[in-house]
Image (spheres, rainbow, N blue to C red):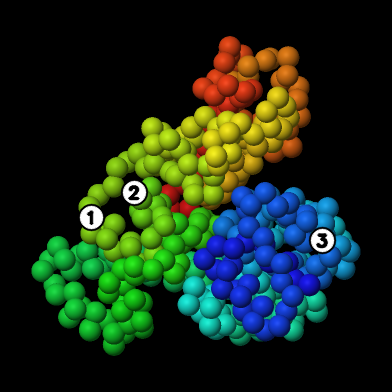
Amino acid sequence: MIAFLGQGRMGVPMARRLVAAGHEVTTWRRGTGVPAAAAVEGADLVITMLSDPAAVREVLTAALPGLRPGATVVEMSTIGPEAVRELRALLPPSVNLVDAPVLGSVGPAAEGTLTVLAGGDLSGCREVLPVFGSVRELGPLGAGAAMKIAVMSAMVPAQVLLAETYAYAQAHGVDREALIDVLSGTPLGVLAERLRVPSEETRYSLAHAAKDLELGAWERGSLATAARKRLQEARAAGFGDRDVTAIVEHVEGGRASRAVPVTVPAIPATNGMYSHAVRVGDMLYVSGVAAFDESGKVAGEGSMAAQAEHVFQVIARILADQGAAFGDIAFIRTYLTDMDARAEYGAVRRRYITGTPPASTTVEVSRLFMPGLLLEVDLIVALTPAGR
């Protein structure tokens, strides 16, 4: 049996390919109330296709009790090699891990023409992976994840470059159709044609493009850094759910604000009166995070430990969305309704914030904005400096 965790734009057609090939498949998505551990119970093969490293870590942690010894987990999301190493440490030695992110979007996923970039021991999944397309066996665990990030570090900035080229052409009276015709005779021809008219269908979301470049951030990637900032601005301006080709519209729309709001689709939406965070240059200011779920109800009511766990999982997703980690937190401020419960809170906090602690303030308040909430946490985070 195969358990397929994640039923988003890519997960749905990929799971259907498995069913069409005659495999017994159990599908699972977040928010249905079904425990991930129950979905993977008895499965020989577990496939994950989720939004980001934090989501994969959370789902596989929840699935651990159901994973049987000898099972193979195939991680097909784009999460980068560092996150793959973290997953290997998370999973028991008796469970094999393969990293196999894909090149291609929704159409190739439905047609079975993706390129699967695989790393690790494929013995438990070699007969299954070709259902999705051509398989490139790249070497040890993490090789597939690293290859995916390397490829996207070229492909995505090239699309941003073309968007800026079109904006330059517009500002200088150059006919776009003529420009694309000229570019068609160059190595950029295919991408130039793709960006001719932004796609109405979201094949590869702009938010995921930004996330992929955030995962690939490194000190010598100056061009990718500039492209990443463009995409982050576009995501904050409301283009995140659009296809990445919408970057053309954003670039042609003019200069962005220095204060860039950040909204993270993977966590509960705000009420429209605030953003999850605001990015100013290389600093991220995170709004107060409290323990409430997608329906607006308090999570872990009555338990400081449960609410703290929820809060830090949400913080992990916000940090991952911006290419940051807990070690990048410069300042953390905690509001507790009962200072006598600070030991329970502290025990959870120490599992997430390790090493040299950030600057910190903890205060007791009489109440928070929603009855039943026991704590709220806000942060200031130092992000990767521009040009690094």
Horizontal side, residue 5 vs residue 288: left or right: right
Is 131 rendered above or below residue 155? below
What amino acid is at disc 2? Ala
**x and y percentages locating residue 93 in the rendered image:** 87, 61
Q: Find out whether the residues at labels 2 and 1 contact each other: C-beta distance under 8 Å.
A: yes
Mark toward the start of the polypeptide (1 vs 3): 3
Q: Which residue is mark 3?
A: 41
Numbered disc 1: secondary structure: loop
Would you name the residue on which mark 2 appears? Answer: 237
Q: Residues within 10 Å of mark 3 (few under 14, many from 20)?
A: some
Label 3 residue SS: loop
Quote the CA–CA distance across marks 2 and 1: 11 Å
Residue 80 pos. (x, y %): 61, 61
The label on residue 303 is none
On the image, the x and y values in percent for residue 269 come to: 48, 41
Looking at the image, do the residues carrying marks 1 and 3 touch, with CB atoms under 8 Å apart? no
CA–CA distance in space, label 2 to label 3 = 42 Å
- Look at the image and tell me whether residue 79 can be seen: no
Dot 2: what SS? helix
Question: Are there few (<14), some (14-19), or many (20+) residues within 10 Å of tag 1?
Answer: few
Closest to the observer, 37 or 142: 37
Residue at the extreme bottom of the image, as rendered: 185
Residue 11 horizontal side relative to residue 158, left or right: right
Give the quarter of the image for residue 348.
Answer: top right
Residue most extreme to the left: 173
- Residue that numbered label 1 is attached to: 253
Residue visible at 51% across and 61% down in the picture: 212
**Nearer-N-terminus badge (2/1):** 2
First along the sequence among labels 2 and 3: 3
Question: Image check: 337 left or right of 249?
Answer: right
